[in-house]
Image: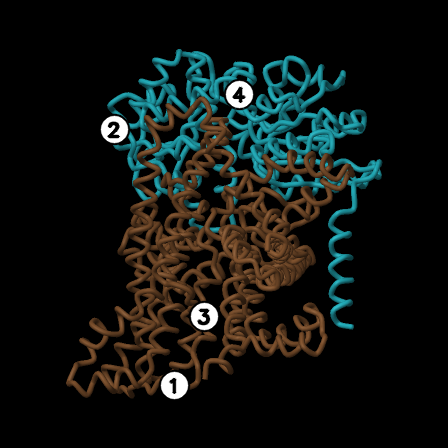
Chain colours: A cyan, B brown
Amino acid sequence: MNKYLVILLMVIFYLQCTNSPNDSSLTIYTHRHYDVDKEIFANFEKEMGVKINVVNASADELIQRIESEGDQTPADLLITVDAGRLVRAKEKNLFQNFNSSMIDSTIPDNLKDSENQWVGITKRARVIVYSKERVDPSELTSYEDLADGKWKNRILVRSSGNIYNQSLMSSLISANGEENAMNWAKGITNNFAREPKGNDRDQVKAILAKEGDIAIVNTYYIGRLLNSDDELERRAGNAVNVFFPNQEDRGTHINISGIGIIKNSKKVELATLFIEYLLSKDVQEQFATANYEYPINSNALSASVLEEWGDFKEDTLPLQRLGELNKEAVMVFDRAGWP
Amino acid sequence: MAISETTYFIKKIKNIFNKWTLATASIILVLCLPLLAILLGLLTGAGNTWDHIQKYLLLEYISNSIYLIIGTGILSSLIGISSAWCVATYNFKFRAYIQWLLYLPLAIPSYIMAYAYVGFLEFEGTFDNITLNTTSGLDIMNIWGLIFILSISLYPYVYGSSWVMFTSLGKKLWESTSLSGITQNKYFFNIALPLTLPAIFAGLFLVFMEVLNDYGAAKYFGINTFTTGIFRTWTALEDINSSIFLAAILVVVIVIIQIINRFFRGRKSYSINDISSNSQNVRKNIKGIHQLLVLTICLFPVVIGFIIPLLQLLKWSMLHISSQLDLFLFYLSMNSILLAFFTSLLIVLVALLLVFLPRWSKNTYMKFLTNFSTVGYSIPGAVIGITLIAASGYFVNYFDYIFNLKIGKYIFSGLALLIFAYLFRFISVAYNPLEANTLRINPSIPESSYLLGKSKFFTLFKVEIPLLKSSIISSSLILFIDLMKELPLTLILKPYNIQTLAIKAFEYADDERITEAALPSVILILIITTIILFLSKYSKVKAY
């Protein structure tokens, strides 16, 4: 008797987990796992009467999965946290084109694919933060300058396995050529305050602990540190100021979180509607305030802390290039001995 | 003459290829699919970045992995053997509790341990605050720190196997050797330790596998190991062929270590059930400073391996408890528990089949082949995940082609694929103890059932399974713990409507929101702790 009950329960559990997505639903594979995303998805569900299924994993895993699932894939949309992975998905022929006059008119060309296969949804800058106590901001100019000997034992940065560092390197290869980018990486390696480790927040905490004086981090981590529930994190955030490099030339390196419609999806219209929803002014402001990212829609306002840092000149390199140069960037890191 | 020879031959063939042989062979074949897919990587060869990997990266991957294995091996042996020796030979206050508390670090996944310790020891972190900011923090994000983290989370494997051995040596051996005037120290180093070595090595083998399985802690500390390298080759260098090639090399090395391990320990297993009542150990009573010393040796691992990280996580979870403690968290916990519960039942069931089918088939080759279907535990979860996700498409197509039915996708996608991956990775956890304990069942018991005309399955369910009840329950519980903690496979293979506590904690941590990762981690740890304590209550009856 008990045996059958267990078997019955197993079958019910299995079926509950395998019910297939129906017509009025969207399945989203996403690398973003912020709580605000869930709120925004829930709002869309309510407004449109559509069910949204979410699979969270890293973009690499999701791309591999969409590839393996082939025409059986339940995925309608893929969201990544960097442009490089979007380009990779496009190269693997996983996306389809979408047409939207709203996207055409509101999103600058460098933040979307030239063939309308993906588009950014939020934007972040990779900046230099410096110790308020020990660094005079007039010392700072550009990423290139960080290779200078005056920064010896003062630079904190995470390892080269991190995608944000890889994208920054791609932008330097694009701006200065591979040879110079390589010398730059070697210069930075000589200036490390410590071996690269930890995440972006740990670099800022290390400035508070006086292990180094400047760090290369993404903007939204500073926003989050300043607004953290943890006192130590707030103090770390308050110990540094943000500097936007390369304002005299090409501008500060930016990257995006972006989205594309999966080739085998049969719900292009609904999916396009969803993308437009994510890019609408209100939702953009919701992203910006909850997660301290920069909105992509220029009509939307940034979070107040971002406003305080002021406007800055962005590198307008088409983000597509970041993806195309990513592999080369990783190899440059390896050759330069940046672990 | 010739005719009878032929009939004899046919009879022999029939004996070898009976229905049980076929059933065994097909289970083994399916279970070996992931292994075959990985080893196929050796034939396919490396991809186009291989020269680059060899020139700039491979040496670092290998040397770091070797340092980690040696360092963690030494440190976890020191902790595990010393505490096991104390618990097995002395009588002191709270001994009965401490004996089980020493297992608790198993409840904390090593990457969560890593985050907790960084928070505890960092500049102006908890330790710094307790000592009134006199330490300016202790940086443990280096290879020594990683060895420390891995050792304190993995020593229970060494502790467990050596404790069982020390206890089973029994008092007779000590009495007879002490007659020759040998001191306790000499007894430990010259007699007990050498006799226990195979058991220690068995525990150490599990430690090594877990060290190679670790991805989260090494990545956070910025230490490039073989396993992080496999990931980096796949994701950053965009070269899945070289990635699987690296994985295949690792698997070959592991299989070699495993053969050495089998050679050392022969057919023995070192589970709690091995302590038979006639090896009752009379422990030495100790008092005063001696007792204090022993208490310190035994409590030290519990404090650093469980209490400190748990307190740090509790401190963090207090920050978000009001916003995080909701129905969703309850749903997550239920989801994790149900998934782990049903999967462990399934794995035990398949393990039982894998134990009994080869016996029924009376075919010795099958027995040998089952060895291959239980190597999954020694392959890093991430490697299995990547291989399966890359190969699942082929599996689906092959199945559909062979059976001419569209059934492949129900077996090799979604939840089924995840459960299949769990099965491959964890089956040895159930298979090894069940197999060892089945050997002890007197063969005349099932034989008499067959003589009464009962079928093999009837005998299995009514006679053999009841005899194996205790090892079935204990191995299901251990499986449950492993499955609750499991991260890489679940992360890579889970379908969209599966969420677990381990995944939730990882997502927060990956997103650099470690304080928010604390609450799901704490719940996970508490559930596992309950299971470990239950296991202790349950096994106590058996052990004495």
Residue B368 or residue B498, whichever sits in front: B368
Residues at marks 2 and 3, CA–CA distance in whole angstroms:
55 Å
Q: Residue at x 70, y 39 (%)?
A: B399
In the rendered image, residue B247, in percent from the top left (x then y), is placed at: 45, 38
Q: Mark 1: which amino acid?
A: Gln
Residues at marks 1 and 3, CA–CA distance in whole angstroms:
16 Å
- Asked if labels 3 and 1 touch by Cβ distance under 8 angstroms, the answer is no
Q: Residue at x 78, y 25 (%)?
A: A268
Residue B304 falls in image quadrant:
bottom left
> Is there any visible trace of residue B516 in the rendered image?
no
**Chain identity of mark 3:** B
What residue is pinned by disc 1?
B280
Q: Mark 3: which amino acid?
A: Ser
Residue B252 falls in image quadrant:
top left
Marks 2, 1 in one chain? no
**Chain identity of mark 4:** A
Residue A56 or residue A151, whichever sits in front: A56
Of discs 2 and 3, which sits in the foreground? Answer: 3
**Chain identity of mark 1:** B
Residue ranking furthest to the front: B1
What residue is pinned by disc 4?
A323
Q: Residue at x 61, y 22 (%)?
A: A92
Few, some or many residues within 10 Å of mark 2 (<14, 14–19, 20+): some
Please report whichever mark, 1 or 3, sits nearer to the chain's N-terminal start.
Answer: 3
Q: Mark 2: which amino acid?
A: Lys
What residue is pinned by disc 2?
A152
What residue is pinned by disc 3?
B271
In the rendered image, residue A134, in percent from the top left (x then y), is placed at: 30, 34
Q: Which mark is residue B432?
A: none
